Image (cartoon, rainbow, N blue to C red):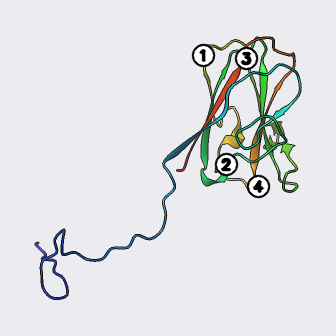
Amino acid sequence: MYVKVTTEDGKPVSSTNGFPVQLTGSKAQQKQVITLANALAITDTGIKFYYNGSWSGGAGAIANWNNYNRRMLFVLNSHDQSIDLSLISDMRGPGIYDFLFAGASNTQQKVTIPANGDFQPIMLTKADLPALDGIFADNVSMTLKASVAPTVGSITVKLVMWAE
């Protein structure tokens, strides 16, 4: 079947003589990558809170976390000590962050990243941290902590988010 499309005055539709078109609605980005830590050197055993691209203040939300329902973390730890990475949430109120726990087993959303992984980035998925999948009612952030103070090295953490 062939259909001829014309304007109101009967002229054929072309690139110069077309219908007005207005786009509506929205579509989330296919994927977003955020570098949360870029060669961050940890030199003590104090807890480090992610805060708007920095690790030097109190906790703050990871941008766009709730715009996506799927996430993976890529971590490269070249420190001479392992580093604990934990997810936290401000469910009790804005700026009041607590460690996240998941499931009936009440498992803390924490992973220990082994030392000296210079050329062995680690990919963390929902199998490692169930909180990486899903949408939260509140803000989510992250902490890093060494149990023993590292003397050399750094850590890089990249977050990849997408919607399904």
The amino acid pointed to by label 4 is: Asp
Q: Secondary structure at mark 1?
A: loop
Q: Secondary structure at mark 3?
A: loop
The amino acid pointed to by label 1 is: Gln
**Which of the two discs, 2 and 4, labels the residue nearer the N terminus?**
2
Above or below, 10 against 124 in this view is below
Q: Nearer the viewer, mark 2 or mark 3?
A: 2
Residue 157 relative to residue 87: left or right: left
Label disc, if present, on residue 114 of the rendered structure: 3
Classed neighbour count for the residue bearing mark 2: other residues with Cα under 10 Å, few (<14), some (14–19), many (≥20): some
Estimate the spatial distance between the alpha carbons at disc 2 and disc 3, rounded to whole Å.
27 Å
Estimate the spatial distance between the alpha carbons at disc 4 and disc 1, rounded to whole Å.
33 Å
Locate residue 158, reporting x and y percent: 62, 33
Classed neighbour count for the residue bearing mark 1: other residues with Cα under 10 Å, few (<14), some (14–19), many (≥20): few
Q: Nearer the viewer, residue 72 or 49?
A: 49
The amino acid pointed to by label 3 is: Pro
Q: Nearer the viewer, residue 89 or 109?
A: 89
The residue at the point 61 percent across, 49 percent down is: 69
Residue 127 relative to residue 16: left or right: right
Label disc, if present, on residue 138 of the rendered structure: 4
Query: Which residue bears the numbered disc 2?
Result: 63
Q: Secondary structure at mark 2?
A: loop
- Res 33 quadrant in image: top right
Q: Secondary structure at mark 4?
A: loop
Query: Which residue bears the numbered disc 1?
Result: 120
Locate residue 75, reporting x and y percent: 65, 26
